[in-house]
Image: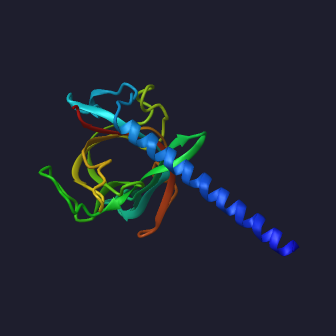
Amino acid sequence: MSYNLDQQTKNTARVRNLFLAALVLGCAFATVTNAAAQKVTPPPTPTAITPPVGNVAFLEGNATGSQGYICLPTSDGGTSWTINPPRPEATLTTDVFGLPVQIITHFTSIDDAPNAIPPVSLGGNATWQSSFDTSKVWAKAVGHIDAGTDPASCPNDGSIQCLLLQSIGNKKGPTGGKLLFKVTFVQRLNTNGGSAPTTACTVGQTQLVPYTADYYFYRADQ
């Protein structure tokens, strides 16, 4: 009897946890869907990293991840840490009931749905993929400012640059999902960490450096 009662208690707890997980995911999906239907408000940014007029921010994700570096030879016979190829790896979250819930994954991949804006790198491009409908956007950097040069949008001196990236490809999810399908520009703002290591290195050595940032996704104003 004690065994059956204990098993029943465990099953009840498991069902409750599954229900709570489903509830959180449902709320997260509703939050993202609602955000996609409205404008969000990025901080003011310098011209170099501001999307052209006619584009509006519709989604924000708070990223935690790492920037990859490889040690390469320099022209003077030394070595240095270089982003080559670029290897961002990050998870973007939004706040639901005080908890960070994943909404997007950021990584490098081959652009298999290029648009008319070149170039597409054979080594892969910066990629963002929705955690809900698996739609994707690939983008390339078209503007940057050094961290610490703008207190409103890029205040943390010594961190990786803040960027404006333009879409070079978009793809719907396998069931038609299109959260990121109409993204035109992406801003990487409020970067913290992620800069190249300052330690000595040997050719071929790699290192991942942690960083955080806020990403804002834009689409053509409707």
Quadrant of the rendering where the N terminus is positioned = bottom right
Quadrant of the rendering where the C terminus is positioned = top left
Which percent across, then down, holds residue 144? 31, 38
* Picture quadrant where residue 131 is located: bottom left
Closest to the observer, 110 or 218: 218
* Residue 61 seen: no
Q: In the image, is 115 to the left or to the right of 97?
A: left
Q: In the image, is 117 to the left or to the right of 210?
A: left
Residue at 24% over, 60% down: 111
Which percent across, then down, holds residue 216? 37, 38
Residue farthest toward the front in the current orientation of the protein: 1
Residue at 50% over, 48% down: 26
Closest to the observer, 18 or 206: 18
Q: In the image, is 112 to the left or to the right of 72?
A: left
Closest to the observer, 200 or 116: 116
* Picture quadrant where residue 96 is located: top right
Image coloring type: rainbow
Closest to the observer, 146 or 24: 24
Residue at 35% over, 39% down: 36
Residue farthest toward the left in the current orientation of the protein: 116
Count of numbered labels shown in the rendering: 0
Which percent across, then down, holds residue 9? 77, 64
Residue at 38% over, 30% down: 40
Which percent across, then down, holds residue 38? 35, 32
Q: In the image, is 167 to the left or to the right of 19?
A: left
* Residue 172 seen: yes
